């Protein structure tokens, strides 16, 4: 099972991915386009060209998880521009995105961190 914690590293591929790709193809995109190791335990989020579906790729130490969400109606309400190759999201921003929201418009409290 995937665990999403505030410490989770989430990378968003801004360019659409070919959704015929499976685990190996998406892992190659992580290495080539995002410059990240797909076996690092980070969560990688991909979107199809039409903006109607998301795929999440994660390695849990034993194997890969590949999850897909396809919207039953409409398209994703938000996706960053493709000006840059990759984009980092916080865990709560990913939750908003998975519910087809706009993380940039969500009014959230700042992340709390203990100052040493």
Image (tube, rainbow, N blue to C red):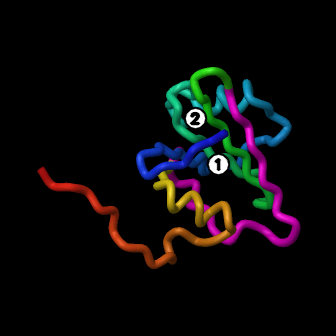
Name which residue lies at 50% across and 31% down: 35
Label annotation for residue 33: 2
Residue 104 spot, x, y in % from top left: 49, 71
Contact, mark 2 vs mark 1 (Cβ under 8 Å): yes
| Magenta segment boundaries in residue numbering | 64-86
The residue at which mark 1 appears reads as: 15
Could you say whether the residue bearing mark 1 is in a helix, strand or loop?
loop
* Rendering quarter of residue 63: top right
Label annotation for residue 102: none
Q: Residues within 10 Å of mark 1 (few under 14, many from 20)?
A: some
Name the side, left or right, on which 113 lies relative to 72: left
Give the spatial CA distance, label 2 vs label 1: 9 Å
Residue 50 spot, x, y in % from top left: 80, 59
- Most foreground residue, 84 or 64: 64
Chief secondary structure of the magenta portion: loop
Total numbered circles: 2
Does 25 appear above or below 90? above
Residue 33 spot, x, y in % from top left: 57, 35
Does 85 appear above or below 100? above
Could you say whether the residue bearing mark 2 is in a helix, strand or loop?
helix
Name the side, left or right, on which 86 lies relative to 53: left
Residue 59 spot, x, y in % from top left: 61, 29
Name the side, left or right, on which 108 lies relative to 72: left
First of labels 2, 1 by sequence position: 1
Q: Is residue 79 magenta?
A: yes
Does 10 appear above or below 24? below
Q: Quadrant of the N terminus?
A: top right
- Most foreground residue, 52 or 71: 71
Q: Residues within 10 Å of mark 2 (few under 14, many from 20)?
A: few
Q: Residue furthest left?
A: 116
Name which residue lies at 73% across and 43% down: 17
Name which residue lies at 59% across and 61% down: 95
């Amino acid at each position: 099972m995937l665990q999403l914690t505030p410490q989770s590293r989430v990378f968003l591929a801004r360019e659409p991915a070919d959704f015929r790709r499976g685990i190996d193809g998406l892992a190659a995109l992580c290495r080539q386009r995002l410059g990240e190791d797909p076996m690092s335990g980070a969560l990688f989020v991909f979107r199809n060209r039409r903006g109607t579906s998301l795929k999440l790729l994660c390695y849990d130490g034993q194997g890969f998880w590949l999850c897909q969400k396809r919207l039953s109606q409409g398209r994703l309400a938000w996706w960053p521009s493709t000006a840059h190759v990759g984009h980092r999201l916080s865990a709560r921003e990913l939750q908003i995105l998975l519910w087809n929201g706009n993380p940039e418009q969500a009014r959230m409290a700042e992340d709390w961190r203990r100052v040493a």
